[in-house]
Image (spheres, rainbow, N blue to C red):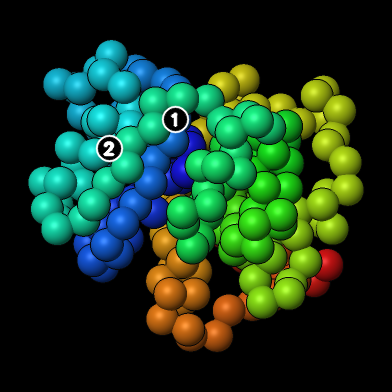
Amino acid sequence: MGLEDWVSPVLQYLAAAGVGNLGIIDFDHVEIHNLNRQIIHNEKRVQQEKVYSASTFIQELNSSVNIDCLFIKINIENAESIIQDYDIVVDGSDNFNTRYIVNDACVRTNKVLVYGSIFAFEGQMAVFNYKGSKQLRDLYPEAPRPEDAPTCEQYGVLGPLPGIIGSMMAMQVLKIITELPVDSNKLTLVDAYHWRFNTISF
């Protein structure tokens, strides 16, 4: 999982639940402006690699969790080899190119993919490739034009929104692990500005 804003609560809840092995992949460093949203980091770890800052947080929360830290950028060449040792992949990327790379690798290796994204006051969450369910390309056959896909870096995001989306993603991961019912071929849409939650089928 990459360490975008909504991955912080995913790591918190999975570690707290005692998920035994977590792999974290990211190639970025902690910056001061991350701290209002990525709450697994703190001021003392600014400029540290995010994967190692996250690992420190997890070890302090639950020392029994085994953590694989990969300080690299995921790409077409390495994606499949990275995810092959894990049962569930959580997509913490912030661009469609990386999302497609991760999705396609999950399809090829038959891995479940828990997807989330945020922008401004809006968020999305879905589970892909679960027991024969559809994948990201069924929902988004091709990436939108860059001008139609603004980023949080451009427009900002309030800290609690990634907490909401990340908590929802963590819930799906734990439901998959414990074999509780999981919605397939559904996209959950969160409008935190008007406080609306909707689910659409695809």
Q: Amino acid at mark 2?
A: Ala
- Taking 156 as reference, is 166 above or below it? below
> Residue 90 appears at what percent x and percent y?
51, 52
Please give left or right for residue 5 compared with residue 13 in the image.
right
Residue beneath the point at 48% across and 84% down: 179
User: Which residue occupies the foreground of this view, 169 or 84?
Assistant: 84
- How would you rate the neighbour count of disc 1 (Cα within 10 Å): few for under 14, some for 14-19, many for 20 or more? many
Please identify the quarter of the rendering in which residue 46 is found. top left
Mark toward the start of the polypeptide (2 vs 1): 1
- Taking 64 as reference, is 52 above or below it? above
Looking at this view, name the residue that lies furthest to the top: 47
Please identify the quarter of the rendering in which residue 167 is found. bottom left
Q: Is residue 60 visible?
A: yes
Task: Check contact, mark 2 vs mark 1: CB within 8 A.
Answer: yes
> Residue 14 appears at what percent x and percent y?
32, 60
Please give left or right for residue 102 compared with residue 170 in the image.
right
Q: Is residue 34 visible?
A: no
Residue beneath the point at 19% across and 41% down: 57
Position of the C terminus by quadrant? bottom right
User: Which residue occupies the foreground of this view, 161 or 112?
Assistant: 112
User: According to the image, label 1 marks what residue?
Assistant: 26
Spatial CA span between label 2 and label 1: 10 Å
Q: Amino acid at mark 1?
A: Asp
User: According to the image, label 2 marks what residue?
Assistant: 54
Residue beneath the point at 60% across and 61% down: 111
- How would you rate the neighbour count of disc 2 (Cα within 10 Å): few for under 14, some for 14-19, many for 20 or more? many
